[in-house]
Amino acid sequence: MEKEKTNVKDEILLHLEKEERNMAWLARKTGIPYGSLYSILVHRIMVLSDAHLEKINQAMETDFIND
């Protein structure tokens, strides 16, 4: 049985939940519009750019890498 690979978007959402933060907080900290974050992380209709990921990592003090 193959273990399912986690996606960086899933990891970001799990980290937010663990830290008891929401996407509105992340939007404020990164300057990325809430709607864009929602489209990237939840609906998955937008690509997570390296520039956005860098802002997310800075805001959350993480070191996620893009898939």
Image (cartoon, rainbow, N blue to C red):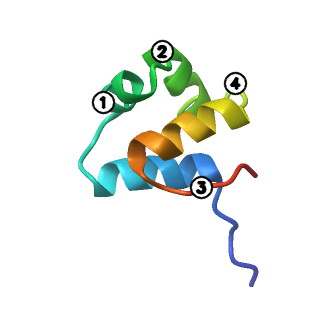
Kind of residue at disc 2: Pro
Residue 43 drawn at (x, y percent): 59, 28
- Please report contact status of discs 3 and 1: CB closer than 8 Å, yes or no: no
Residue 5 sits in which quadrant?
A: bottom right
* Badge 1 density bin: few <14, some 14–19, many ≥20, Cα 10 Å: few
Label 3 crowding class (10 Å Cα cut-off): few <14, some 14-19, many 20+? some
Mark 1 and mark 4: span between their CA atoms?
20 Å
Distance between the alpha carbons at the discs numbered 2 and 4 = 13 Å
Instruction: Name the residue beneath numbered marker 4.
Output: 46
Q: Which residue is mark 1?
A: 25
The N terminus, quarter of image: bottom right
Residue at image location 45% in from the left, 47% down from the top: 13
* Secondary structure found at label 1: helix
How many callouts does the rendering have? 4
3D distance between C-alphas at marks 4 and 3: 18 Å
Indicate the amino acid at tag 4. Answer: Met
Residue under the point 68% across and 69% down: 4
Q: CA distance from mark 2 to mark 3?
A: 20 Å
Gap in Å between the C-alphas at discs 1 and 2? 11 Å
Q: Which residue is mark 3?
A: 64
Q: Are marks 4 and 3 in contact (CB under 8 Å)?
A: no
The reply to whether residue 66 is visible in this rendering is yes
Say which of marks 2 and 4 sits in front.
2
Kind of residue indicated by mark 3: Phe
State the residue position of label 2: 33
Residue sitting nearer the eye, 50 or 11: 50
Mark 3 vs mark 1, CA separation in Å: 18 Å
Residue at left 51%, top 46%? Answer: 57
Spot the residue most to the left: 20
Amino acid, disc 1: Trp
What is the secondary structure assignment of the residue under circle 3? loop
